[in-house]
Image: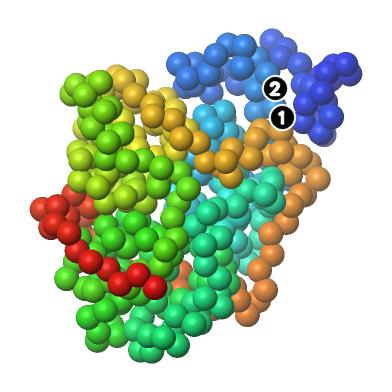
């Protein structure tokens, strides 16, 4: 039974404010030690009681929380059972023995978890947590693309809806997109591959391979805002700072960055190389999360928040667990076809090295055919 101290005159999760008691302070002390450099004491007194309540409720409900790299630190470090990028979280969901999965991320991630774990209950705390990339293309669009380019394989970024994955030959992530494109070309015996929906990812992949790329004009509303001028300005203001960029950024951003790769690749870069000062050109909550582990690195934060990721909070995670809201479902036929595309990617051997998008070839302009 879950017993909580309640102050009736204040409002928070599910209409209640949980008290920051000495017991709560002791219970959440390990998390506080990790986040104390990035969360103020005043914020912590409000967040710690909810963190404790959520972690108790998980045990009661036989649930786990999948926390994406773009979640805020109190979610990522405080209640996340599995943390990482979208596909890594879905794989963990499939391996977990828990009955309930709460997706601390956006809707397409919850769908992917459901696709790989159809027997489990998948919840998303806020149905409005969408994605500009996922919204940029539909299953009907993919069917028309296949009619226009018969016989060419369709490689689809995991940042898409289940209905789009269902029309796809194989999925990819930003970490393995080059490998998947080249493997698709080999298996289909072609020299052109359709890579959708992220235009900038497609352009950056095109600079890494001799396979010709056909792309769709979808963009991440966070990463498309960065410019090469921004990066050069940061480098001038912070001499010696190492700039790491996500491949959803425009190609000219990657050309002036020191390294480019997936969220996991950026995380590994910082923790392995331990730069003195670093800039992560991506959603700014990630810098907070990496900073909690990289205590000897100074983080410069050119902050761009994803409005969809920010819809997920401790409060609505608690309510999702308490009330079983909001359950994510995928039609059986759609899920089966989407699962095939995801599984084809999962079955590939790990790439020989993570995609970095900063090779010499990437310094040269390569055209893509834009649908």
Rendered position, 95 above or below 139: above
Q: Residue furthest front?
A: 229
Q: Is residue 146 above or below residue 258?
A: below
Question: On the image, which quarter does residue 350 sit in?
Answer: bottom left
- x 34%, y 58%: residue: 201
**Which of the labelled discs sits on residue 96, or is there none?**
none
Mark number displayed over residue 49: 2
> What x and y, as percent, mark residue 267?
34, 38
Would you place residue 40 above or below residue 12 in this image? above
Quadrant placement of the C terminus? bottom left
Residue at left 59%, top 38%?
A: 310
| SS for dot 2 | helix
Placement of 203 over or under 35, stated as above or below: below
41 lies left or right of 284: right
- Residue 70 located left or right of residue 332: left
Say which residue appears at 27% left-offset and 36% top-offset. 229
Which residue corresponds to the image point at 56% horizontal and 28% vertical from the top-left? Answer: 74
Residue 331 location, quadrant: bottom right
Is there CB contact under 8 Å for labels 2 and 1? yes
Residue 348, horizontal then vertical, whole percent: 32, 69
Q: CA distance from mark 2 to mark 1?
A: 6 Å
Instruction: Tell me the element at label 1.
Output: helix
Q: Where does residue 116 sit, x and y in percent of width and height?
A: 55, 65
Q: Nearer the viewer, residue 360 or 318?
A: 360
Residue 359 point in image, percent of width and height? 14, 52
Disc 2 crowd rating (10 Å Cα; few below 14, some 14-19, many 20+) is many
Quadrant into which the N terminus falls: top right
The residue sitting at the right extreme is 8
Mark 1, residue position: 53
């Amino acid at each position: 039974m879950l017993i909580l101290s309640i102050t009736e005159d204040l409002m928070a999760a599910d209409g209640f404010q949980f008290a920051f008691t000495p017991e709560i302070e002791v219970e959440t002390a390990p998390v506080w030690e990790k986040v104390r450099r990035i969360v103020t004491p005043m914020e912590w007194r409000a967040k710690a009681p909810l963190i404790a309540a959520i972690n108790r409720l998980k045990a009661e409900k036989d649930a786990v929380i999948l926390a994406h790299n773009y979640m805020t630190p109190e979610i990522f470090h405080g209640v996340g059972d599995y943390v990482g990028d979208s596909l890594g979280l879905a794989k963990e969901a499939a391996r977990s023995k828990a009955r309930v999965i709460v997706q601390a991320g956006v809707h397409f991630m919850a769908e992917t978890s459901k696709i790989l774990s159809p027997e489990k209950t998948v919840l998303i705390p806020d149905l409005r947590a969408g994605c500009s990339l996922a919204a940029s293309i539909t299953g009907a669009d993919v069917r028309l693309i296949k009619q226009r380019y018969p016989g060419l394989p369709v490689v689809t970024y995991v940042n898409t809806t289940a209905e789009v994955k269902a029309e796809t030959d194989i999925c990819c992530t930003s970490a393995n997109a080059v490998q998947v494109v080249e493997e698709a070309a080999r298996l289909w015996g072609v020299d052109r591959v359709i890579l959708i929906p992220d235009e900038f990812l497609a352009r950056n992949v095109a600079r890494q391979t001799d396979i010709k790329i056909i792309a769709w004009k979808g963009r991440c509303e966070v990463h498309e805002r960065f410019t090469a001028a921004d990066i050069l300005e940061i480098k001038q203001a912070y001499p010696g700072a190492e700039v790491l960029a996500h491949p959803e950024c425009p190609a000219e951003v990657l050309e002036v960055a020191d390294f480019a790769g997936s969220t996991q690749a950026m995380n590994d870069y910082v923790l392995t190389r331990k730069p003195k000062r670093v800039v992560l050109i991506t959603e700014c909550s990630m810098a907070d999360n990496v900073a909690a582990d990289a205590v000897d690195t100074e983080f410069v934060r050119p902050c761009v928040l994803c409005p969809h990721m920010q819809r997920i909070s401790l409060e609505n995670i608690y309510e999702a667990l308490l009330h079983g809201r909001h359950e994510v479902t995928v039609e059986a036929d759609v899920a089966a076809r989407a699962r095939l595309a995801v599984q084809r990617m999962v079955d590939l051997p790990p790439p020989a090295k993570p995609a970095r998008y900063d090779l010499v070839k990437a310094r040269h302009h390569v055209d893509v055919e834009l649908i």
